[in-house]
């Protein structure tokens, strides 16, 4: 059974029994910046063939032309999170502008899947608590960041993850890069 990667972040809010049922040996794959028309499809194919579900923090401006991928993510049981509309640093703009970025992506995902985004990964990990945006979204960061966007070397990405990952960790990758998708599937 799939448990969203945010279960351990919500631990204080959940009854003890619910937390005890969580699989503490799991690690959680999360992907930012997509969907990418080629790499996200290949990633979804690979995850499906392995019976793995992940979390995708999508950028709203990347949805156009990739609507079927968003629908597929939802249909296959992946969590779709919000990564703003234009991948802007939220703490560097007004709250109203930031809320617009979040709400625009939420509306696109809702239109395609029937459900909005409950979770947000702020670009660059930059979050302000004042950004409630009249939406109850939960900010989610990460435990392991292999800086996959800095290299095209799949082996290096895999090594960086394996060196740092521990049970229960949230791994940050990007489905916008071929080497990151290859590393995730490896």
Image: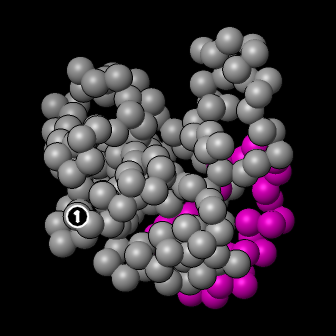
Q: Which residue is mark 1?
A: 67
Which quadrant holds residue 137?
A: top left
Residue drawn at 23 percent across, 64 percent down: 67
Location of residue 160 with respect to 171 vertically, above or below: below
Quadrant assignment for the C terminus: bottom right
Residue 169 location (% of width, % of height): 72, 47
Crowding around mark 1 (Cα neighbors within 10 Å: few <14, some 14 to 19, many 20+) is some
The residue segment tinted magenta is: 151-177
Which quadrant holds residue 48?
A: bottom right
* 165 within the magenta span: yes
Residue 101 visible in this rendered orientation of the protein: no
Residue 12 location (% of width, % of height): 66, 16
Residue drawn at 51 percent across, 39 percent down: 140
Apparent side of residue 139 relative to residue 183 in the rendered image (left or right): left
Location of residue 112 with respect to 182 vertically, above or below: above
Apparent side of residue 169 relative to residue 82 in the rendered image (left or right): right
Apparent side of residue 10 relative to residue 169 in the rendered image (left or right): left
Apparent side of residue 172 relative to residue 121 in the rendered image (left or right): right
Location of residue 11 with respect to 126 vertically, above or below: above
* 86 within the magenta span: no
SS for dot 1? helix
Q: Nearer the viewer, residue 37 or 33?
A: 37
Residue 37 location (% of width, % of height): 31, 78
| Coloring scheme used | one colour
Residue 55 visible in this rendered orientation of the protein: yes
Residue drawn at 64 percent across, 75 percent down: 185
């Amino acid at each position: 059974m799939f448990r969203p990667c945010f279960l351990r972040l919500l631990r204080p809010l959940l009854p003890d029994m619910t937390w005890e049922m969580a699989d503490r040996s799991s690690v959680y794959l999360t992907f930012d910046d997509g969907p990418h028309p080629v790499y996200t499809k290949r990633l979804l194919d690979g995850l499906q063939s392995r019976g793995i579900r992940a979390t995708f923090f999508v950028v709203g401006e990347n949805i156009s032309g990739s609507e079927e991928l968003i629908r597929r993510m939802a249909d296959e049981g992946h969590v779709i999170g919000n990564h703003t509309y234009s991948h802007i640093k939220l703490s560097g703009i007004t709250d109203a502008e930031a809320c617009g970025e979040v709400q625009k992506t939420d509306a696109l995902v809702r239109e395609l899947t029937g459900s909005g985004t409950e979770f947000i990964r702020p670009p660059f990990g930059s979050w302000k608590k004042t950004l409630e945006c009249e939406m109850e979204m939960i900010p989610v960061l990460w435990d392991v960041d292999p800086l996959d966007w800095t290299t095209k070397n799949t082996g290096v990405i895999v090594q960086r993850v394996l060196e740092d990952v521990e049970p229960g960790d949230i791994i940050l990758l990007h489905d916008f890069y071929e080497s990151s998708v290859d590393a995730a599937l490896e």
